Every structure is written in C-alpha cells, then in structure tokens.
Amino acid sequence: MVKKLKYDIVVSGASDMKTCKKGTKEKAQQLGRELARKKCIVISGATNGISYEVSCSNRKAGGFNVGFSPAISKMEHIKSYKLPFDPYDVIIYTGADYAGRDVMMTKSGEAVIIVSGRTGTMHEFLTAFELGKTIGVLEGTGGAADLIRDFLQKMNKKEKAPIFYSADPKELVDLVCKELAIRNKNLKK
C-alpha cells in the first residue's frame, strides 16, 4: 500500500557543513524529522552537507527523499561528483551540472526551505523567489539563510509569495505547511 504524502518540499543548503553556524547540523536533522512527521516529500540536490543531513533524518523518521543530481548517471554521481546515494529513495540524474540541476530541482517543489548555504543556495532561493514559491528560511544557521531578509530589503523587492523566517525547524515547517494547505485549498475552488 502506498502512503499518501502531502507536500513536495525542496530543502536547499550548504554542501559544506564547515560554512554553517554551530548547531546547524542538529537543526537540519530536526528539519528532516519534522518534514517526515508532516508527511512531506523531501527534495534536495542529492549532495553532502545540509541535503544529506535532512534526507538521512527524514528517512529514519519514515519519510521519502527525492534527489536531483548534477550528474548524468549513478556512476558519474558517485565517482565523478563524489556525492552520496544512500538516503535517497529516487535520484533524478539531470546531466545539467549544478546550475541546471538547481533550477530543475527548485521548480519541482511546492515550497523551498533554505538552511545556511552559499552561492548555490542563493541561486536556488532567487529561483524560488522569482517563481513565486512559498519559502521558509531557517535563520541562525549562517550563510545565505542569514542574509536573505536584509538582501531583500536592500533590493527593495516585493514578495510574490510568502517568505517565512524562523530559527526553529518545527515552527518553520508548520508555517510552510499551513501556507501550502491554504494554497491547495484555493486551487480546489
């Protein structure tokens, strides 16, 4: 029997945990558990760091993970890119390198949650922003996540969809899922 899952949530974040603030690994793991608890499919870049931590904890909590690889095949994913394979239920081999993979991955989800990160994460955030996706930002994790609020103010950009900010993974998942429930209810009308 196939279990019914609610939402497709992209998780974007640092591939190198050294760039994250202290405690970010634990927050990423809690985020994965919360997404499983809310019966969300976790979509990520099938990479190390935040994506890996969220996907591992999501899987341990009974969740489902989809990875978007920059590689063209499983062999290239593992041997050339040196990326993990184990926590993903499905990996989509895009063959589009990182920038192309980022766009495909971001477009595939109903919402995007940002955790720490550098330029790739900012690219995924800006793609989600321009597409009008619901966005959650896990503040206090360093990198892009801690710069987004100020960046948008300085750019004087108006949101096309809600952006939720929180330092608490549970609260952030709750806010994003509530917004998706409203959006999905409006779609049925």
Image (cartoon, grey):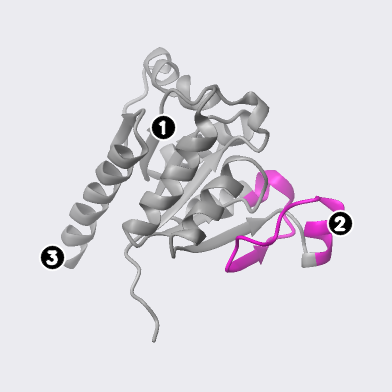
> Can you give x and y, in whole percent of width and height, for residue 181 in the image?
21, 56
| Residue 73 visible, this angle | no
Rounded to the nearest angstrom, the CA distance separating label 2 from label 3 is 48 Å
**Element class at badge 3:** loop
**Quarter holding the C terminus?**
bottom left
Q: Nearer the viewer, residue 14 or 120?
A: 14
Q: Residue 69 occupies which quadrant of the picture?
A: bottom right
Pointer 3: residues within 10 angstroms few (<14), some, or many (20+)? few
From the image, state whether disc 1 or disc 3 is nearer to you.
1
Numbered circle sitting on residue 189: 3
Q: Check disc 1 and report its element: helix, strand or loop.
A: strand
User: Magenta part of the protein: which range?
Assistant: 75-101
> To which residue does mark 1 refer?
138
> Quarter of the image holding residue 78?
bottom right
| Residue 150: image location, x then y, percent | 41, 15
Q: How crowded is mark 1: few (under 14 residues within 10 Å), some or many (20 or more)?
A: many
Q: Along the horizontal axis of the image, is 183 left or right of 72?
A: left
* x, y percent for residue 103: 57, 48
Tell me what residue is drawn at x 37 percent, y 38 percent.
169
Nearer the observer: mark 2 or 3; the answer is 2
* The N terminus sits in image quarter: bottom left
Q: Residue at x 62, y 57 (%)?
A: 68
Three-letter residue code for mark 3: Lys
The kind of residue tagged 1 is Leu
Is mark 2 in CB contact (under 8 Å) with mark 3? no
Residue sticking out furthest to the bottom = 1
